[in-house]
Image: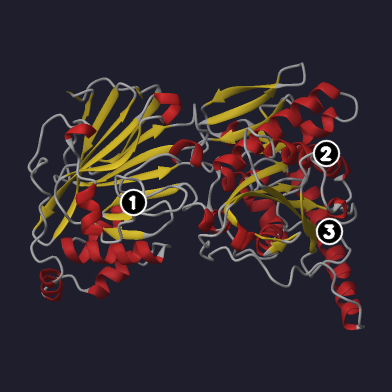
Amino acid sequence: GELTSKCCTQNRHKTVVGQMKYLLVSLISALSARDASAAFIASSVSGKSNVGTGPTVKYEYDMEVPSSASKKCALVNIVMDESGSMTTEQNFLKDTAIPDIVKELYTTTYGYSDVFVCSNGFGGYIGTDYYDYRYIGCTKGNANGSLADNSITTWNVKGHWEDGYYAMSKSMENVPQVIDSVNLNTECSELHKVIILVTDEDSDSENWATTPTMMKQEIATLGYVLNIVVDSTINGDHNNVGIRLNNLAGDRNTIFKANGSGGFTTIDKNEPFEDFVAHEGLGVYTLEHYYPLIAGTGGAAYNVNSLRAGFPNNNLLTLSFADAFVKTKVQEIVDNCSGNTCGGGGRSEIGGDPHITTWKNEHYEYHGQCDLVMMNDDEFADGLGLDIHIRTKVVRHWSYIQSVAIRIGNDVIEIEGSAEREDPEAHYWYNYEYQGEAEDLGGFKLIFKNQVTYKRQYIVDLGSKYPGKQIVIQLFKEFLRIKFDGSEQAFGNTVGLMGDFRTGKTLARDGVTELNDYTTLGEEWQVLPADGSLFHVASYPTFPEKCLEPEDPKGERRRRLEESTISYEQAEAACSGLSDPLDIKDCVYDVVATQDLDMVGAF
């Protein structure tokens, strides 16, 4: 019944004949996989070891990095389909992709101390668990591109039940804490991680409760950038070897196209990927299962059919595939300073009352009223420079972000909300002109979205320089939230309220003193004359006047909350749909503080 539902109700790309063909193959695969798994379980019960269950001591993703850690490390985590059709792809990874990626990361250009490679298989019959997954091993790469242990790339080519979601989860779980005598938790001050899924089918998952959203969240939480080599032909042309979906909607895309001489060029295609990407083989649900996982993350998809078309008769196409794959993977690794060892995965935000999330995913609040330096980097985008200032406003015992001003190069955009629910106007100033014609900010595309009159979105698309990265300003009535989807390359040198990108520390202007009193931190980053004036008009207080503090922010809050018409229980119910516990906490407070259940919309 699950197979029938999966085949005939979800798929919109195949004919009825194709659907039935897929159903038959899937049914045979399922029965064969079940029999193979049963045989494996029986052999385990009879006393044979369960090969490939994973390392005994595993890497701890949430462990604090000690100050003694000094190595810059990279981890390439391979998740390889071991079914019978995967010989070409396995050889490509083993002989070309892995050696070239490892060798490039060790060059002085990138300067990694240690590069590690982990290998996992799924869809085969040997040494696997019930879901046909097996942990093969992890090893250290050498400067010449070779591996300390070549056996980890000895994959099988027999099997056909491919549960890609389960395999990715297990592959991230099964990273050893120590690889070739190097302790990743205590010796790597930075660990940049990518996970590469290689398969020619969709995810034959038995766990139908695992959604793309859940899988994507797991990958992001553990600090990986995902890349997929899958059955997805791009615009009907095998010369289009890969594609990056630069936003969550998947309608702003960059295609990697073979140039006919062994290299590649990039082409922008700004329309929904579903309109021009399609499977050729049995990857019937590839677009539904795997493409959403890379949208807006900086990861990319590569067409397994392009690789097969190039090997062995079209060497130039194979070289182009390799060139695009290796270069983009190296850059993604470099950009992805993520997880507990490198800030918070390139994401931070500020919004609400105001709730500030640092690059290390730590939350704090500052309630003063004044102009504040949210972010500054004079060398951003090869010297264009970046400044982001926010203007906060106190309302008795709480405060909110009233407006934000962003400068890139010589352009400035200032944005503010409106307390009027039916206000039809977009309140912004472009280069100090109200509603001035604004198409880009310092050469980066500006996108305006108007969901309803009281809920707007402004996006600074950084993709032309930093693929997949952006600054998003969300407006809900008069409340602003500013979100950053970035990377070390984009925001690694920024200073301000968001903290240090690499360590997450909230530092003073001297770049050394760590400030854990957040009132002191806020006062430290009040806009000074030397920071320049980005807003079209000045607002009280302006330095040397100090930031205004709310009335008795702790005692008054407690009293006001006790007298609230909207209870905590009502606020918790309204905010229960959020997934992040800290977002729920912030949402509950904001709903009660403003006495407005609609405040959930700000999250």
Quarter placement of the N terminus: bottom right
Q: For mark 2, what is the residue?
A: 92
Residue 528 lies in quadrant = top left
Residue 359 location (% of width, % of height): 42, 51
Question: Reading the chain from its start, which is encountered first: label 1 or label 3?
Answer: 3
What amino acid is found at the position of numbered circle 2 in the picture?
Answer: Phe
What amino acid is found at the position of numbered circle 1 in the picture?
Answer: Leu
User: Which sits in the foreground, 386 or 445?
Assistant: 386
Tell me how the rendering is colored: secondary structure
Question: Reading the chain from its start, which is encountered first: label 1 or label 2?
Answer: 2
The residue lying at 69 percent from left, 39 percent from top is 106
Quarter placement of the C terminus: bottom left
Q: Is residue 429 above or below residue 478?
A: above
The residue lying at 27 percent from left, 27 percent from top is 412
Q: Which is closer to the viewer, label 1 or label 3?
A: 1
Q: For mark 1, what is the residue?
A: 507
